[in-house]
Image (tube, helix red, strand yellow):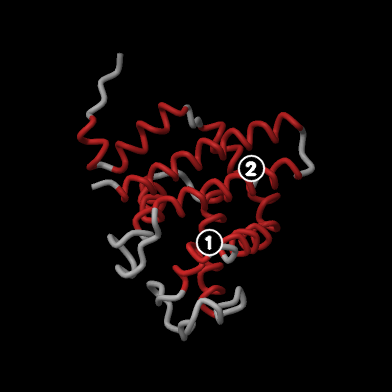
Amino acid sequence: MQHIDEARLESDVGYRFGYLVEFMGLTANDILAIHGSAALLAPLVAGLVDAVYEKLFTYDATKRHFLPRQAGYEGETPVSLESLTVHHEIIRFRKEHLGRYLKALVTRPYDGKMVEYLDMVGKIHTAKAGNQGIVVPLVQMNALMGFVSDALISTIFSLDIAAEDKIKTVRAFNKLLWLQNDLITRHYQG
């Protein structure tokens, strides 16, 4: 039986990530499947991003988080929820961030820098980073991750690749998104 330092899981994101990778069985072959999907998924990223924002704009509980100034955004902010459209400059700014995130998932090595990046994705949605006035409730983050997971799985199943490659890729992304979800929810504790 392997000993796990549970206190360290809460204080050392690299240790936590390593534990989750091992526990979930995210292997080098899974990473190869994720990276191997890059050329096929890259042309579809804009459509995935648009689908995410269409969904986010369906509910006031998710759309409202785009009214305040986002960290790093220098343009004009929308004046009301009703006036905010998916074509607003702040949404283009946010879409670029999501697009870069999705591209990072399929291109970057899963090293210490990537672990820190994935952890920051969780942190930035709380008062612990970015604009402290923007705190996306955990229920909204979980809903978003579920939607992204389903959209990504649906996209992978639509690819013109062998069935066994689809299965490998879906399983790899499933593990990765569960890891990401853990690195989000950890910032909502305490």
Residue drawn at the location 46% of the way across and 86% of the way down: 76
Front: mark 2 or 1: 1
Residue drawn at the location 69% of the way across and 56% of the way down: 44
Q: Point out the residue furthest to the top here.
A: 1
Residue 149 in picture, x, y percent from top left? 58, 45
Gap in Å between the C-alphas at discs 2 and 1?
Answer: 20 Å
Q: Nearer the viewer, residue 120 or 63?
A: 63
Residue 95 position (above or below residue 3): below
Q: Which residue is mark 2?
A: 36
Residue drawn at the location 65% of the way across and 45% of the way down: 37
Identified by mark 2, the residue type is: Gly
Q: Secondary structure at mark 1?
A: helix
Label for residue 98?
1
Q: Residues within 10 Å of mark 1 (few under 14, many from 20)?
A: some
In the rendered view, does 48 fall on the left or right side of 75? right
Of pointers 2 and 1, the one earlier in the residue sequence? 2
In the rendered view, does 98 fall on the left or right side of 74? right
Residue 137 in picture, x, y percent from top left? 39, 56
Q: Nearer the viewer, residue 87 or 101?
A: 87
Residue 5 in picture, x, y percent from top left? 22, 29
